[in-house]
């Protein structure tokens, strides 16, 4: 994903990309039923991955994310996601949490998320 920070006073005001890494943690009570295939699980990891893929990764993969007031929006012919906020790592986490809200089974709650822009630069959100 690429982004640019409108009005920023550094290099990040220019379009640039990251190989983001997103970590999602859920909480809930593990299933306690020996007859159930999901016995001992809060939620199957593959099901969590599918939800995140559908609502976060797919819409934003290979996209340019810009705030709605960005002057860079003129004449773009690329996959662009326009946000009502500055696309910082912190704001992206809040946005991702809103995208995932209500997408897990009712007994499973989103607990935390961590988004890495680089190996050593990340933001973390606890819900």
Image (tube, rainbow, N blue to C red):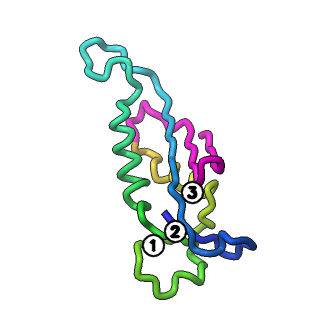
Tag of residue 80: 1
Pointer 1 local density, CA inside 10 Å: few below 14, some 14–19, many at least 20: some
Residue for point 75% across, 73% down: 9
Is 17 or 81 nearer to us in this picture?
A: 17
| 23 up-or-down from 72: above or below | above
Q: CA distance from mark 2 to mark 3?
A: 10 Å
Tag of residue 92: 3
In contact (CB < 8 Å): disc 2 and disc 3? yes
For the magenta stretch, what is the residue range? 104-127
The secondary structure type at the circle numbered 2 is strand
Tag of residue 39: none
Judge whether residue 107 is colored magenta.
Answer: yes
The secondary structure type at the circle numbered 1 is strand
Residue for point 51% across, 36% down: 25
N-terminal of the two: label 2 or label 3?
2
Pointer 2 local density, CA inside 10 Å: few below 14, some 14–19, many at least 20: many
| 100 up-or-down from 67: above or below | above
Name the side, left or right, on which 110 lies relative to 119. left
Name the side, left or right, on which 63 lies relative to 70. left
Residue sticking out furthest to the front? 119
Q: CA distance from mark 3 to mark 1?
A: 15 Å
* Place of residue 114 in the rendered image (x, y in percent of width and height, measured from the top left): 57, 44
N-terminal of the two: label 3 or label 1?
1
The quarter holding residue 106 reads top left
Residue sticking out furthest to the top? 34
Which residue is disc 2 drawn over?
Answer: 65
| 118 up-or-down from 60: above or below | above
């Amino acid at each position: 994903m690429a982004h640019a920070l409108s009005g920023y006073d550094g290099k990040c005001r220019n379009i640039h990309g990251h190989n983001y890494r997103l970590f999602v943690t859920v909480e809930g009570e593990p299933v306690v039923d020996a007859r159930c295939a999901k016995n001992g699980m809060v939620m199957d990891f593959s099901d969590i991955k599918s939800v995140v893929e559908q609502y976060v990764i797919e819409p934003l993969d290979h996209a340019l994310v810009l705030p709605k007031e960005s002057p860079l929006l003129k004449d773009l012919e690329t996959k662009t996601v326009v946000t009502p906020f500055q696309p910082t790592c912190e704001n992206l986490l809040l946005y991702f949490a809103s995208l995932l809200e209500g997408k897990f089974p009712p007994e499973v709650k989103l607990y935390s998320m961590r988004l890495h822009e680089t190996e050593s630069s990340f933001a973390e959100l606890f819900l």
